[in-house]
Amino acid sequence: MIVLFTDFGLEGPYIGQVEAVLQQRAPGIRVINLFSDLVPFDIQGAAYLLPAYAAGFPPGTVFLCVVDPGVGSERKGIVLQAEGHWYVGPDEGLFSLVTRRARSVEAWCLPEVAGAAPSFHGRDVFAPAAAFLARNSRLPGDCVPCTPDPGADWPDDLSRVVYIDRFGNAVTGLRSTVVAETAVLTVNGRSLPQAQTFSDVSEGAAFWYENSNGLVEIAVSRGRADETLDICVGTPVQM
């Protein structure tokens, strides 16, 4: 399957145009729209979500990952193979945590594509490469080995909010394994105890928990954490 991980949004033509290319180039292969609402331009935040959410997919899955404020610049397009998965996208740091946490990684630079729109490599460069990988389980021609570099100095875990879902829950870049269950986290001066799930606390209570993908998430039972705690993407979390 091909999994989309982008900041393109559901509004407008962008996801539809990418999916149309995938349908033409890899007919019959399932396309899963995992994230279309990543925070625009927030490469670092997306980098901490990617390994957590990719882990549940089977070997051979191709991840088409585009958060690309540097589109049209000299930044390279790359293909990675890590933990049995393929990743395709711009080399701007988006794959930094995937490569750091994988036991083994191979990376290649994609060749330039003649006629590609300089402002839409997601459609014209990365989607065709992802389709080729999904159909053939091997690299497109003329790829050369390379070493991804951006994001190498980022921390192993990111103590800030990186995503807010439709319920107002705030996902952080912290893996739950690095936070003690007894820890009380602080956000905007508010102390947050740990709970296993929403029903373990009273209605309106704020807490943190390990979400289903192993990340620390901040929530309010039957409420919106973003509004109750005045949280937005980028809000720091103190341990």
Image (tube, grey):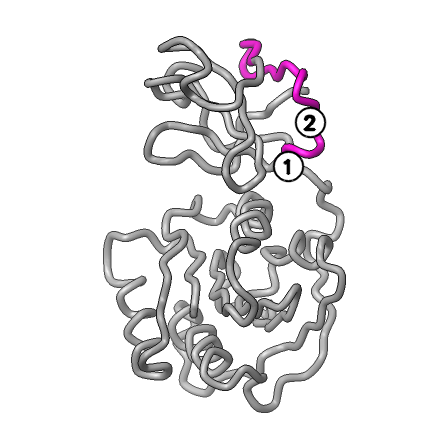
Q: Is residue 128 above or below residue 185?
A: below
- Which residue does the numbered mark 1 point to in the structure image? 175
Q: Position of residue 166 (x, y in %)?
A: 33, 35
Q: Quadrant of the C terminus?
A: top right
Q: Is residue 129 above or below residue 164?
A: below
| Residue 183, magenta (yes or no) | yes
Q: Disc 2 marks which amino acid?
A: Val
Residue at 74 percent across and 53 percent down: it is: 152
Helix, strand or loop at label 1? It is strand
| Residue 74, magenta (yes or no) | no
- Residue 163 or 63: which is nearer the viewer? 63
Helix, strand or loop at label 2? It is loop
Q: Position of residue 125 (x, y in %)?
A: 46, 77
Residue at 46 percent across and 15 percent down: it is: 200
Tell me if 214 is positioned left or right of 20 in this view: right
- Residue 64 or 82: which is nearer the viewer? 82
Residue at 57 percent across and 10 percent down: it is: 191
> Mark 1 and mark 2: span between their CA atoms?
7 Å
Q: Is residue 57 above or below residue 145?
A: above
Q: Position of residue 171 (x, y in %)?
A: 50, 34
| Discs 1, 2 touching: Cβ within 8 Å | yes
Q: Quadrant of the N terminus?
A: bottom left
Q: Disc 1 marks which amino acid?
A: Arg
- Which residue does the numbered mark 2 point to in the structure image? 179
What range of the chain is rendered magenta? 174-192
